[in-house]
Structures are given as structure tokens and as C-alpha cells.
Image (cartoon, rainbow, N blue to C red):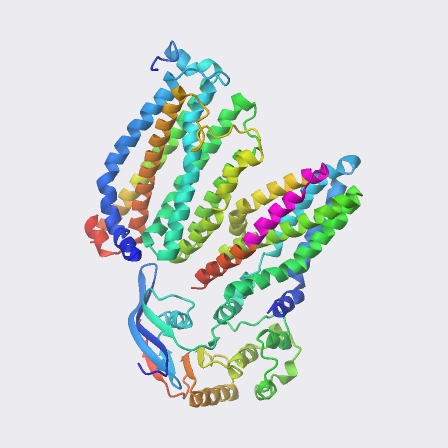
Amino acid sequence: MIKKFIHQFASPKTYLYQVDRFYSYIFLFSIITYIISITWGLLYTPEDFVQGNSYRIIYLHVPASFLSQSLYIAMAISSVTYLIWRVKLAAYLVIAIAPIGAMTTFIALISGSIWGIPTWGTWWQWDARITSTLILFIMYLGLISLHNSFSNHEKADKLLSWLVIVGAINIPIIKKSVDWWSTLHQSASITLTDKPSIDPVMLYPLIGSITGFFGLVICLVLLSSKYQIFIREKNKSWVKDYV
Amino acid sequence: MNNNSLIVAENIGYKINENKLFHRMSFNINRGEALHIKGSNGSGKSTLIRIILGITQPVKGVIENKSTKEICYLGHKNALKSYLTLEDNINLMQLNNNMMLNDYLEKLELKKYKDVTVSNLSFGQQKKLALLRVFLNNSDLIILDEPFVGLDDNAHLELTTFLNNELEKNKSVIFTSHIPCNINSKIIEIPQ
Amino acid sequence: MFRLELLKLRKKTRSWLGPILVFWLIMLAYPLTVEFLQDKLEIGFFSVLWIAILISMMLATEDIFTEDFNDGSLEQTLIKNLSFSISIVTKIFTYWLLIGLPISILSFIFSLGTTEDFLLSISIFPLAIISSYIFLNLFVLGNALSLNKGSVLGALVTMPLALPVLIVLGKGLIAIQLNINFLSFIFLLLGSLSIIIVVIPVVVSYVIKAHLE
Amino acid sequence: MFNFAFNSLYEALYMNGHGLYVWSVVILVFLSLLGFFIGYTIKIKKIKDKLNEPN
């Protein structure tokens, strides 16, 4: 029963129409929230007592590093659906997300190191959290290069999904790395469990920037999945009359 | 669908990156029956064989293999280790404890090359060595992809007689071959 | 099954002796390059040791599947009723036995030679054995993924998986040198090894099946 | 809550020494977002034209 539901819901055609319907709303909502919370965070919140103004990078760094991991988990989930239920759309999603995940991880890395200059004095520090994000970045590159090196799409999808699943083992290591090797990195400002360790005035813009950035990234994923669907289903009849 | 049908295929279809190789192909192979797959090169003969073998999943349709024993298969590549001697290759193919081994080595004149490394053997001899796997098989389905290529006359004759009496032993054979051979078999044509 | 794999690899000296020689070369070259720092040899020694194990394992899996893929014996193993991942596990074990084990023994001898501290070298031995096996499994996955596309892609894909292991090795090493209880690191590696031993062959079997399609 | 943290635009840019880092990150993030959005819209448009041409 589930298989029928998934196939019926997740057929590229219905997906495409859904995306078109919601895309503009999501895009509008997230661009507004993002702009507001960034300006709010950058210009309207008071200076941090310890780090002065450089802490404001948190509004750009935290959403990016948060997204880089959740995008990978999203890829892992869609590769599992692809391998178990042979849902074509899930394979397109995996390939659609990979470059965007690479972008967010790249932003997280660069913003982290730029943030490091004033606070830790060096732009690169072999601290566990940063190295794991670097590892994640290399994994994204590995995934993209693996996908591009195969002409036969079905084969590339299968290999990619298996690599994503094996790579997913690395995500908990990143999570654990902050407390396992208690090193330089400040422990996560927002953890789902305990009380956030930054005071509310700075917290609200942070939550705003995360939701805004999240929405924008989702729009990017929708766009790139549309692109994937066009490439892969180009000689299907419905694509012609859709276009 | 009588019970002695070994392979049953219902309108299987296959396509690579949107271009269709073949579709709506159904056939079934009974025990003791031979099937000759004909088609110009690149028309998907080998892909069909790989689908029957179960290596490749057909994009559409269903294929069912009722034989419990391992399938005896020989493709274009004859799966030999060129850096090892003929003797080692026979061990690798796990044929060394087969009593018929020696007289087939005699028939195919491979006896005297026992410890010659395979890379020094001629193409025909390597083919015969690979065919040992077919002569000494104990499976009830034999699949051969262009088996007669590179064989001299007596080996060609040897293989044809062998395949014919395998059919009498109620085994079934699926093969592709551009070289004519007198094995009475059903024929399937793959359109271009 | 294992006997056959052993036969196949033993006769192919280039592919099992090669990695060991490379390991030997790296370990010999190390003291030569830091001749004047005679007393500080130990600190650099172990990092070079781990990197040498990593590289020789990468070389060991250079053509672990490519050769069988090209000459068609991969299809033959696939058709056999014996499950495909078991034949992969035996293949990896043979490679480890002929390449990983000698390298771990060598690393024990070398560490004995450089640090002259028997207890330290003895405790290095299990770390070397486990990590060489983990690296071998990871690079086998890398090789399987990039079967006919050259091993650069395989290395790029596997590197991120191997790095956390290197981090754990580094931490384990410090624990040994300060001789606080380093058993926890060995168990940590053993734990990840036991997961990898099960997961990787299954994944590799699916990956190769995808290649053969 | 909404008082302007800096008393002049210049100070907002300078952020007593940290402005360079903060604003370079802001530029980086906006450029990459912009780049990806434009990149994908162009790609989709191109492939749409290619699909429309043949028939």
C-alpha cells in the first residue's frame, strides 16, 4: 500500500506541478524572513561582551553549517527511498541536493574561518568540528565527481545512493566531535535539548536567519530538482506539453 | 505453463538512458530445449543474456528462473587468469576433482600445456580452456555467448555433439552465434 | 573459496609485494630525512607510520576488482549460488592477510627499532592491525565505486571516511605515549571495525552488481 | 529591542575593527546564493528552449 502511495505521490509529473504551485510562496516568505533577520542581527543587536562585533557572523555561519548537515541527511533519506522503493524522483533529489550541500558546507567553512581570525587569532584551526565539516565538504565533492563520471544514469544513481548511505556514518561523528574532543569550538549555541546558551536578544534573529536560509535553500533544491527532472525525463511525452 | 519450463519471461523490456533496446519480449524455455538468440551486433543480445542470468534487471516485465542449480555461463570474456598456469586456472574453476577432466583435456589437446601460463596460449586454446567449464558443468541451464568463435573444426564438432547430448539429458541451452551450427533450437530474433 | 583467493593473489607478486615495499621504503626514508633531529624521532615517527599504512593500503586495493572486472570472472562469481558478499569478505581477508598483516608486523619492528620501548611497540601492534583492516575495507569500497574510472575518484570518495579513523588513531597514540589507559581506543577501533566488516562487503556487492548491469 | 546598535552608518561598516570580516562573509553568502539561483534558472530556461525547438 505504501509503495502505491509513494509511486503515486512521488511521480515526477505531480511533483513538478506541486513545486510550481508552492515555489513562489516559499521563495517570498523565506527571502523576507532572511533579509529581516540578517539586518536585525547585523545592525540592531547589541555588541557581544567578549567577541565584540565579530560574533555577528553567527547569523551566517550557524544556518550554513546547520543546513550542510541536514541536507546530507535529506540526501541519505532519499537514497534509502530510491534503493528500497525504486522511486526515480528520490534519485533526482539526491543529485539535485549535492551541489547545494557543497555550497552550504563551503559557506560554513569560509565563514567559520573568517570568524576565527578575530576570535581565535588564526584562520584555520585543526579543531575537530572544523575538520569534520571539511570532511563533509570533501564528501560532497566526492559525490558530485562520482555522479559526473558515469554516462549511464541508472548506474550513477545506484552508486551515488550507496555512497551517501555509507557516508552518513560520518554525520554522528561530526555531532560527537564537539564533546568527544573538547576543543576550541564553542559548543552548539542551540541544542534541541538544553536551554540555548546565548541570550534571547541575539537568539531571535538567529532563529529567523536559520528559517530564512532554510527556506532559500529549499527553493534552490526545488529549482535544481526541476532541472534534473527535465534532463532525465526529456523525451517523456508529458514533459513536452508541460514546457 | 507446464512444470518443466525452466525460464519464463513475460514482455520484458530494457532501455539505456532513454533509448529502448527491446520491449514486449516474451518466451519460455523448457528443459531439454535449445534457444538461439539472433540479432545484429549491438541489438542487445548480450543484454538479454545478462537479464536471463539475473545480472541485469529488466526495466519492464518479469523473468523467472526455476533452476535451482548454478547456471553455467560463458560470455565473450573467458574469465581466465592470464598470469596463472593452465593447471591453476582449472583449480580456480574448481574443476580439478572432476573425473571427466582428463579425457576432455585429451580431446581438446590441452593435456601437454598443463603448466604453461595462459598468456602464452593461443586465442583458440584459451577459448577451449574456458569451454572446459561448459564440458564439465553440472547445472541444468547452459548459457553461451558466441561459443564457436576461434574454435578449430574438431573443437567445433566436439562442442556441437556435446551440446546436443546435453539436450538429450534434459538440460537446456541458450546461445548466440553468428557461426552456423547444427543444434536444433528455437530461434528468437531481436529487432534492430 | 579462501584457498582460491589465496592462490590468485599469492601468484600475483606485483600486487601484494608492491604495497609492502612501498611501506618499507617510507619507513626507511623517514629516519634518513630527519637525520639531525636524532632525539625527536619518536614524535614524527608514529604520524609517518599511520600515513604509510594508509598509503600502502590504498596501493594494495589498486586493482582488487578491476582485474576480475575486465577478464569476466566477476560475473562468474556473481552467478554462483554462494552469496556475493561472502566472496568479497574472503577476498578482502586474503588481501589483508598477505598485505595488512606483514605491514603491521613491520610497523611493530620499526617502532621497536625507533623507540626502543617494547611496551609501546606492543601496544602499537593491535592499533596497526585494526586500522590496516579498516583502511583496506574503505579503499575496497573506493575501488568498487570507481571500478573502471581510475582510482583517483575512489581515493577522493574514500578519503573522508578514512580521516575520522586517523583522528582516533592520533588520539590513541597520545594516550599510549602518556600511557594512560589506551584500551578504550582499541575497543573504539574494534567497534568500528566490526561494523565496517559487515557493512562494507554488502555495500560493495550491490555497487559491483550495479556496475555489471 | 530595536535600537540601532551603531550611532552612524560609518560605524556600522567599521564595527570597531571587525566590520571587514562580518561584511565579507555577508557578501560571500549573498553572492553564492545569487549565483546558484541565477545559474539554475538559466539552466532550466535553456533546457526548456531545447525541448521546445524540435517539435
| Depicted C156 relative to depicted D24: above or below | below
- In terms of secondary structure, what is the magenta stretch mainly? helix
Residue B41: horizontal and vertical position, in percent? 38, 72
Q: Is residue C16 above or below residue C120?
A: below
Residue C141: x %, y % from top left: 53, 54
The quarter holding residue C20 reads bottom right
What is the magenta range?
A: C174-196
> Is D27 situated above or below C155?
above
Left of A157 or right of it: where is B26?
Answer: left
Q: Position of residue A134 (x, y in %)?
A: 51, 38
Q: Point out residue D3 in the picture as x, y percentages from the top left corner.
A: 35, 12
- Left or right, residue D12 beside residue A125: left
- Residue A221 appears in the figure: yes
- Name which quarter of the figure residue B45 lies in: bottom left
Q: Nearer the viewer, residue A193 or B164?
A: A193
Where is the C terminus of chain C found, in terms of image quarters? bottom left
Left or right of B111, for residue B35: left
- Of A231 and C83, nearer the camera is C83
The answer to whether residue C148 of the structure is visible from this angle is no
Residue closer to the observer: C145 or B125? C145
Residue C205 drawn above or below residue B140: above
The reply to whether the magenta stretch includes residue C190 is: yes
Q: Nearer the viewer, residue A130 or A223?
A: A130
Q: Quadrant of residue B83?
A: bottom right
What residue is rendered at 48% in x and 88% in y?
A: B162
